[in-house]
Amino acid sequence: MALKDGTRVPRLVKVGGLVGLVCVVATGCSPDQVLRFGWPTGVTSDAESMRQLWTWSVIAALAVGVLVWGLIFWTVAFHRKKSDELPRQFQYNNPLEIIYTVIPFVMVVVLFYFTATTQQEVQAEEEPDVAVDVISFQWNWEFRYPGYTTPDGEAVNTVGTTNWTPLLVLPTDSNVEYRLSSKDVIHSFFVPKFHFKRDTFPHPDKNNQDNVFQNTIDREGSFVGRCAELCGTYHSMMNFEVRALSPDKFERFMDLRTQVNPSTGQPYTTAEALTEMDCGELCNPNSVTTIPFDPDRQSSTPQQDGQAVGAGN
């Protein structure tokens, strides 16, 4: 029995649109979350650039998918077998072969172009506002600020211990340069909220390795950092925390780090300086996103997040 013209296609379009609307509404997602297609929220401008690349790549993939699905359903619906007669055969259809060769090539070139430009933007380097030396070792981290000096003539630094998670204190709205190296094996500097990670190698200068990258943190907060390269027995415990402060708070922090603590007679440590600043949760002297490095695997006593023992460097 033949179908009336104009009845099937509009009905399919309406049903498809309704299903799509129900799917979006049922997820309870905001428009921004829908456009992210699962991409997490970052805290740097570079993270937003990568999110835009991801969004448009998914949209392009969905457009191709819809076209392919439409051709499949159109063929199934309107070109079903009507008789035993062999359909007209096509061989060596040059225009068709050119089309399905050129179009994928153009798609790959366009995707490569936007990927390369985004990569160049993320890896671009200019004069930094703050530089920090990130030094990894089994199984902790050291952070040095070569632009700031303590009263004893040493660069301001922070070193993690087995009872204190190291805090990498950085300013927001400033171009920060990270210089990575390792004291032993290969590690990897990874802050999930940065959407960026890079391996840390021993002697990167001698091995001609790119160990520098930059970014700008958009907002204040505490962000967990991890080693993302299997580096030994306690790799999973090799965490740190980025503490992003506004520029005025960061300058106050560094002013304290370059002074002597009158109560100890020694330069202020990171924990002591943050305690002295007393600016709420952002000045918590202990990590709030992860727990201290614990080498005792047999311990049955749970540790509380950020409740470390000791003042830390």
Image: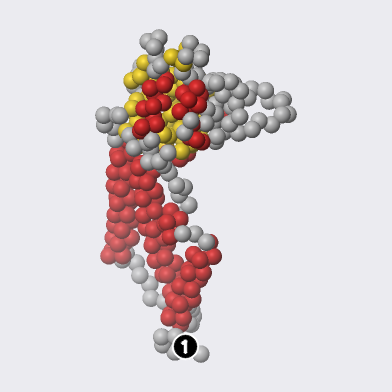
Is 15 positioned to the left or the right of 59 in the image? right
Q: Quadrant of residue 26?
A: bottom right
Residue type pointed to by label 1: Leu
Is 130 positioned to the left or the right of 263 in the image? left
Q: Nearer the viewer, residue 9 or 168?
A: 168
Image spot of residue 52 (x, y percent): 36, 50
Q: How many marks?
A: 1
Image spot of residue 303 (x, y percent): 66, 30
Image spot of residue 121 (x, y percent): 30, 40
- 99 to 133, vertically: above or below: below
Could one spot residue 180 in this view of the protein?
A: no
The residue sitting at 39% across, 23% down in the picture is: 254
The residue sitting at 32% across, 43% down in the picture is: 118
Check disc 1: other Cα within 10 Å, few if <14, some if 14-19, many if 20+: few
Q: Nearer the viewer, residue 260 or 203?
A: 260
Q: Quadrant of residue 68?
A: bottom left
Q: According to the image, label 1 marks what residue?
A: 3
Image spot of residue 147 (x, y percent): 33, 20
Q: Nearer the viewer, residue 287 or 274?
A: 274
Secondary structure of the residue carrying tag 1 is loop
Is 203 positioned to the left or the right of 129 in the image? right
The residue sitting at 33% across, 27% down in the picture is: 130
Q: How is the image coloured?
A: secondary structure
The residue sitting at 64% across, 33% down in the picture is: 304
Could one spot residue 36 in this view of the protein?
A: yes
